[in-house]
Image (cartoon, helix red, strand yellow):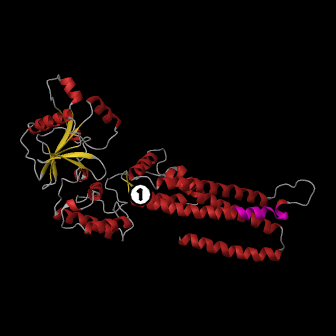
């Protein structure tokens, strides 16, 4: 009957007709075969004739009953698009026909690279709801074997890959949706298929092309006011003012949240997540937290040794001695060191999971935090806790050491150690101001 059974590279079964018609319905079932044939006739008679062939294809799929389709739309279970029509293939009443025989379809013209239908639809938003393939390069990804993308199209696609590849090596705010390693592999793949038909290239190529096309769309590529840097907004919106709580906690955590807020403004722009900077940000944080946990452990060991000094704990008398000021400072240092270790380990564990998440998961997480009471301030403060606790632990230990040194030593020792301490303080402040 002109139908050929094909298998998608990912494993899905679909069928191709010699006249350029595709469906994923199992037409080996006689009843389904009759329904598809009747649907094809009804689609071709729905308006001006559209001749299918080598350049124009018809893709048709059987949709679930109307009640299930409405539930899917309400639940938002799918993000693809669907254009539907109800076809009465037998002498049945309209309600039964609408329940059993609903089809999604579209025509695709490969020469003009556009989708078309036999009649004009008034509600475009409802037209593009949930049909697989009604998106950019998605049709080529759904039915790869029947499509031949000409050499000039692949040549254009090669330059769309080459441009972000060269761009990713220069500014830190590159708009590329892939990192340098991924772009290098994609560029190597694209260089082998330049000037050839799409039949010879990998099934991953349309997916890559779709991701690049979406990135250009999000950045208003070719339009007035296009986004040229990852941290550039294309809308005239006022920046959200920081809360008083943010300013207070920022100083308590030694201004560390400001550093993370600056990075987050590059990652989360116009409610879109820049996935490559997001992954790099998480990797950098994990390395930072590993070092902070190590430093907190060192200070914890130093406090244990410090507390064992007799002059610190006041041992030697029969009655329990009162806690000295140096001992209290050391206790505070121990508590904040343990807090730095605990928060650092917990954040590392959570971030290792987030590094494996998709861009959509990252966007959902950022949207959830952005819509919270304090917005991105919550993430910035949370990520700064290990550093802030470590600094308080270090300062508490230094205070305990200074108290012990100035209380239990002679004048010569105090002068010498005090002079060195002043020099260390000056150099530390100089380093902070330089940074």
Q: Quadrant of residue 303?
A: bottom right
Direction from residue 162 to residue 247 in the image, left or right: right
Q: Residue at x 79, y 68 (%)?
A: 406
- Seen as rendered, the residue at the extreme top is 93
**Main secondary-structure element of the magenta-colored stretch:** helix
Q: Up-down: is 240 above or below 69?
A: below
Q: Up-down: is 185 above or below 365?
A: below
Q: Quadrant of residue 26?
A: top left
Q: In the rendered structure, does residue 308 fall within the stretch colored magenta?
A: yes
Of the 4 image quadrants, the one containing the N terminus is top left
Give the extent of the magenta segment: 300-312
Q: In the rendered structure, does residue 433 fall within the stretch colored magenta?
A: no
Of 361 and 315, nearer the camera is 361
Q: Up-down: is 37 above or below 323?
A: above
Q: Residue at x 85, y 63 (%)?
A: 310
Q: Residues within 10 Å of mark 1 (few under 14, many from 20)?
A: many
Residue 93 seen: yes
Can you give x and y, in whole percent of width and height, for residue 210 in the image?
27, 55
Direction from residue 285 to residue 412 in the image, left or right: right
The residue that label 1 is drawn on is: 267
Q: Residue at x 26, y 30 (%)?
A: 66
Can you give x and y, in whole percent of width and height, for residue 333 in the image?
70, 59
Q: Quadrant of residue 253?
A: bottom right
Direction from residue 313 to residue 174 in the image, left or right: left
Of 57 and 73, nearer the camera is 57
Can you give x and y, in whole percent of width and height, for residue 98 in the image?
21, 28
């Amino acid at each position: 009957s002109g139908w050929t059974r094909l298998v998608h590279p990912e494993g899905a079964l679909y069928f191709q007709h010699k006249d350029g018609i595709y469906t994923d319905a199992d037409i080996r079932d006689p009843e389904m075969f009759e329904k598809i044939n009747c649907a094809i006739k009804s689609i071709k008679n729905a308006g001006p004739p559209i001749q299918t062939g080598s350049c124009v294809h018809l893709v048709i799929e059987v949709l679930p009953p109307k009640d299930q389709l409405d539930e899917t739309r309400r639940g938002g279970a799918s993000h693809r698009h669907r254009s539907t029509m109800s076809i009465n293939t037998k002498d049945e009443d309209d309600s039964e026909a609408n329940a059993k025989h609903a089809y999604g379809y579209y025509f695709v013209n490969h020469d003009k690279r556009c989708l078309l239908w036999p009649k004009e639809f008034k509600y475009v938003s409802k037209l593009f709801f949930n049909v697989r393939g009604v998106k950019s390069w998605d049709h080529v990804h759904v039915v790869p074997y029947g499509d031949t993308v000409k050499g000039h199209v692949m040549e254009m696609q090669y330059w769309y890959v080459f441009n972000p590849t060269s761009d990713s090596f220069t500014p830190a705010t590159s708009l590329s949706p892939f990192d340098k390693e991924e772009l290098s592999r994609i560029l190597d793949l694209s260089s082998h298929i330049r000037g050839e038909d799409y039949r010879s290239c990998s099934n991953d190529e349309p997916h890559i092309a779709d991701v690049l096309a979406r990135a250009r769309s999000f950045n208003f590529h070719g339009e007035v006011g296009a986004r040229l840097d990852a941290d550039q907004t294309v809308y005239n919106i006022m920046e959200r003012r920081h809360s008083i709580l943010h300013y207070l906690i920022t100083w308590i955590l030694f201004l560390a949240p400001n550093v993370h807020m600056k990075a987050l403004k590059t990652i989360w722009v116009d409610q879109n997540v820049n996935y490559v900077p997001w992954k790099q940000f998480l990797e950098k944080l994990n390395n930072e937290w590993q070092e902070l946990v190590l430093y907190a452990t060192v200070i914890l060991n130093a406090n244990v040794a410090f507390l064992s000094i007799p002059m610190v704990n006041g041992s030697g008398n029969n009655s329990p001695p009162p806690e000295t000021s140096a001992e209290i400072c050391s206790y505070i240092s121990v508590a904040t060191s343990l807090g730095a270790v605990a928060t650092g380990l917990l954040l590392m564990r959570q971030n290792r999971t987030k590094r494996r998440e998709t861009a959509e998961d990252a966007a959902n997480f950022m949207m959830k935090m952005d819509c919270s009471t304090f917005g991105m301030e919550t993430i910035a403060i949370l990520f700064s806790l290990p550093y802030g606790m470590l600094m308080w632990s270090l300062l508490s230990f230094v205070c305990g050491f200074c108290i012990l040194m100035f209380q239990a030593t002679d004048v010569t020792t105090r002068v010498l150690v005090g002079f060195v301490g002043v020099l260390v303080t000056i150099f530390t402040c100089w380093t902070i101001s330089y940074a």
